[in-house]
Image (cartoon, grey):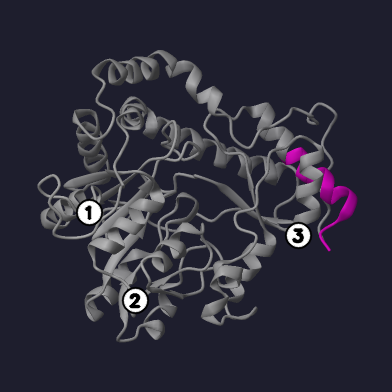
Amino acid sequence: MATVVAPSSSQVSSVPVPLLDLKAQFAPIRQEIIAAVTAVLESQQFILGPVVSECEARIAEYCGCRHGVGVSSGTDALLLALMAEQIGPGDEVITTPYTFFATAGSIARVGAKPVFVDILPDTFNIDPAQIEAKITPATKAIMPVHLYGQCADMDPILRLAEKHGLTIIEDAAQAIGAEYRGRRAGSMGKYGCFSFFPSKNLGCAGDGGMVTCSDSEAAELLQVLRVHGSKPKYYHSMIGGNFRFDAIQAAVINAKLPYLDRWSQMRQANASRYRRLFAEAGLIGTGCVQLPVEAPHRRHIYNQFVIRAARRDELVAHLRTRNIGVEIYYPVPLHLQECFAYLGHRPGEFPVSESAARETLALPIYPELTDAQAESAVEAVRSFYEINGAD
């Protein structure tokens, strides 16, 4: 293993670094948020309504789509898209086992079978080369995930969908504003599903989500399904659910949206700073860490900055003792989750996903991360490997 460079005393820092600091984001836009929420309170129109319609139109435009349908969460966005396609028992949906639970969970909730395809080792996104072998007569859709803020390799996935007559439902919960060959996340499939969970790059003050699409008939169907399948009110030709968007949450998104691109640029700058700091610390090429890869023709918006690390669990414990916020996304791939035991998967079936689950961790990447905080995080990583090595 190559030598890890010890920093000078002036480089060493013990600055605490939270994994996320939403208060730092809120402080400079506090009055705008309060004004937006107050306007909703004064209107006393809390569910759907004009504020939600404004949010839907603005998010659709931002994502390069004709329509946006606001919903109660990112999970419900996925669920609603599946319901709109009448996917249910006996159907199969192809997706990745290395993602947040909602991806496969939503497929199971409509009674369909999640069919897993392993990921690429560099981007952590679904491997398009392995998809066609999993397509059967029961396959109805492919649900690629744009993980950590970087789009999946969509062109081959879109070609497969066209060839086999499948629907593409993009899980873009972590990727608003991410791009693939000039196209925005959520605009390439029939549906794009977004989360406005507070920790996302564009987060509201609770739960919220959006389905984007450019098919007007599909958008109308989504709107009906989110209100129990009611059209007109109290008349039900289909069974939907209660997936309505909260106007206060929409107001928060409306106030934050003008800042999103700036925040994404700050995240990208933080990623570049991390790369420089890791290189200066002598950690590149040592076998200790592997930094995130930006694939060609992508705009990576860094919802997370995820590294591979030797002795990952020991490193995580070390970082936490140094007050460095860190998280493991995701420690157990979905095919090994207890609730999916009925699918009959065994360890070793999806080796790339399993190695990612063993080796990855996320470092703080929020826009307001300071130089001192980034330096403290990298120094904490360096100090661990100086003491323990990579093996």
- In the image, which residues are magenta? 378-391
Quarter of the image with the C terminus in it: bottom right
Task: Name the chief secondary structure element in magenta.
Answer: helix
Amino acid type, callout 2: Pro
* Mark sitting earlier along the chain (1/3): 1
Residue located beneath label 3 in the image: 310
The picture quadrant where one finds residue 192 is bottom left
Amino acid type, callout 1: Leu
Query: Looking at the image, is mark 3 or mark 2 nearer the viewer?
Result: 2
Name the mark on residue 225.
1
Going 20% across and 37% down the picture, which residue do you hit?
Answer: 57
Question: At numbered mark 3, what does the secondary structure look like: helix, strand or loop?
Answer: loop
Count of numbered labels shown in the rendering: 3
**Amino acid type at image mark 3:** Ala
Q: Is residue 311 above or below residue 325?
A: below
Which percent across, then down, holds residue 260? Answer: 38, 33
**Near-viewer residue (261 or 28):** 28
Judge by depth and name the residue closer to the eye, 386 or 22. 22
Q: Which residue is mark 2?
A: 89
Q: Position of residue 297 (x, y in %)?
A: 37, 56
Choose the circle earlier in sequence order: 1 or 2. 2
Residue 40: assigned label: none
Helix or strand or loop: what does disc 1 sit on?
A: helix
Q: Quadrant of residue 73?
A: top left
Left/right placement of residue 10 relative to residue 243 reads: right
